[in-house]
Image (cartoon, helix red, strand yellow):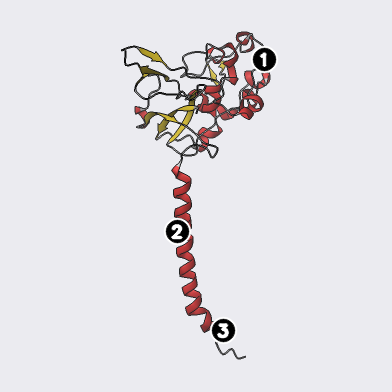
Amino acid sequence: SNVYVYYGLSNFYQNHRRYVKSRDDSQLNGDPKSLMEPSKECEPYAFHENKPIAPCGAIANSMFNDTLELFYNDPNGTKVQILLNTTGIAWWTDKHVKFGNPGGNSPNLTAAFQGTTKPINWRRPVFDLDADEGNNGFINEDFIVWMRTAALPTFRKLYRIINKKSGMVPTLPRGNYSLEVVYNYPVRSFEGRKRMILSTISWMGGKNPFLGIAYIAVGSVCFFLGVVLLLVHHKCGNRNNNADISN
């Protein structure tokens, strides 16, 4: 089946209140007015050198930008690069409803973003994020995936998809693989760690033990409290019912 490539970060609190609010949804939807006049929620990442930042806010400014490349080490001694598909990693509703470029699907994104500047920590402007012309601007899928903030400090986000092959040929054959990383994203400042995950999913989704552990823990607590309340009712309830109440 398809193999999904994720990048993971630990000790990164995307659920911080001020961090979550630091964005302008109207700007991300392609509103020309918000493009030139970002929301105050984006401060201090709204303007840089008197130019509006596109996209503004702390979430966009801290976007993950490492590059991961996977190679299969052929027994003959050659390295074969694995094709990592960049499309289909974002939610359909995000890409087609919540995010949009100014001017719609205009091919000239340079003109659409004229007068704006890139986020402070970015290496390139938003209209030049990807070599694919249809995957730039606010509809860049790497950007959209990052903007959907995680609920926990240790999380992973979908990076690429390795499409399954026809017939019974395995998507990733047995053997040795090499991972090459272009290191751009620093994590030492917040004592974090980065990781790369290969996974498959079924119709029930990917493997995630968190919900199972949470359900077992909450169920155990409820069962314990139920036993305690039953004992309290058994010992104290009859005493109240048999009490002689007189005026």
Q: Earlier in the sequence, mark 2 or mark 1?
A: 1
203 vs 193, left or right, is right
Q: Nearer the viewer, residue 208 or 36?
A: 208
In percent of the image, x 52 and y 35: which residue is there?
18
Task: Please tell me whether mark 2 sits on a helix, a strand or a loop.
Answer: helix
Instruction: Tell me: residue 218, above or below residue 73.
Output: below
Task: Please tell me whether mark 1 sits on a helix, a strand or a loop.
Answer: loop
Would residue 43 be seen by someone viewing this image from the given angle? no
In percent of the image, x 42 and y 24: which residue is there?
172
What quarter of the picture does the C terminus occupy?
A: bottom right
Q: Residues within 10 Å of mark 3 (few under 14, many from 20)?
A: few
Q: Position of residue 21 (x, y in %)?
A: 56, 33
The residues bearing labels 3 and 2 have C-alpha atoms spaced at a distance of 31 Å
Amino acid under label 3? Asn
The residues bearing labels 3 and 1 have C-alpha atoms spaced at a distance of 75 Å
Which residue was labeled with disc 2? 220
Which residue was labeled with disc 1? 105
Instruction: Tell me: residue 81, above or below residue 157.
Output: above
Where is residue 181, by image quadrant? top left
Amino acid under label 2? Ser
Q: Position of residue 120 (x, y in %)?
A: 48, 18
Q: Residues within 10 Å of mark 2 (few under 14, many from 20)?
A: few
Q: Position of residue 214 (x, y in %)?
A: 46, 50
Task: Please tell me whether mark 3 sits on a helix, a strand or a loop.
Answer: helix
Amino acid under label 1? Asn
Q: Nearer the viewer, residue 150 or 214?
A: 214
Residues at circles 2 and 1 in contact by the CB criterion of under 8 Å: no
The image's mark for residue 195 is none
